[in-house]
Image (tube, helix red, strand yellow):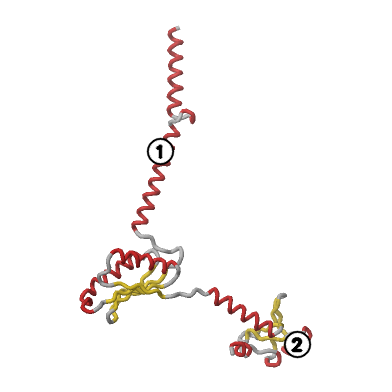
Amino acid sequence: MKNDKMKNQYRINEQIRVREVRIVGEDGSTVVPTRQALEMARDEGVDLVEISPNANPPVCRLIDYSKFLYQQKKRQKEMKAKQVKVEVKEIRFGPQTDEHDYQFKLKHAKEFLEEGNKVRAYVFFRGRSILFKEQGEVLLLRFANDLEECGKVEGMPSLEGKKMFLYLAPKKAGVAKKSQQARDREASEVEAKEAAHQQKANLDVDTPANGGMLANAKISADALKKLTETEDE
């Protein structure tokens, strides 16, 4: 069925009934009368295949139609293989989820987002636990904040029946926003490196072998000693 559908997608040979067509190939393109294009196809033992009917004039190729269909099918497979399949992964909480369970689920959610998947986190309120819906909302907001470096919120927590949902989408690679804590840590590391570099520079200045301040002081002392000895004589 699929092959039949693809065969009917293109007009070939006598099915092409316009006055002129544009023939494209490795050497470029040229506009010729359709009758001449059909003769060119017959001389080469191939088909005249219309590949762009909406162009003015329509664009055609001189190619064996079976080979052309094979190329199109192969190209579609390659494009389909390159498409990234985005899945929605679910993370379930209770309104009173303990810290260990929270960190465990936070780790998995981070992995899902980094793999390019979306995350649907929700708090399930069983029975009278619906009274703790504010606590569930706080939990989901904390969850979103802890994932700000790799995920973006697609909507604020919303209650649907006995479940409160939060949707997160992965951030694009290279544009993840750093937390304030991460930025402060990097700034501290830069300051520490600059301080170490300055300290090393000071030590280099004071090294006699490098002609630093101590070396100059020694030279001055030797000169003063020689001057004193000359005056005594």
Counting every numbered tag in the picture gives: 2
Answer above or below: position of 9 versus 128. below
The circle drawn on residue 36 is 2
The circle drawn on residue 41 is none
> Badge 1 is on which residue?
199
> In this orientation, does residue 17 appear?
no
Q: Position of residue 179 (x, y in %)?
A: 35, 60
The amino acid marked with disc number 2 is Gln
Pick the front one: 149 or 101: 101
Could you tell which of marks 1 and 2 lies nearer the N-terminus? 2
Left or right: 168 as drawn, with respect to 80 = left
Tag in front: 1 or 2: 1
**Residue drawn at point x = 33 percent, y = 64 percent:** 103
**Residue drawn at point x = 63 percent, y = 81 percent:** 72
Answer above or below: position of 198 versus 170. above
The amino acid marked with disc number 1 is Gln
Q: Quadrant of residue 177?
A: bottom left
- Circles 1 and 2: CB atoms closer than 8 Å: no
> In this orientation, does residue 123 appear?
yes
The N terminus - image quarter: bottom right
**Mark 1 surroundings: few (<14), some (14-19) or many (≥20) residues within 10 A:** few
Pick the front one: 192 or 6: 6
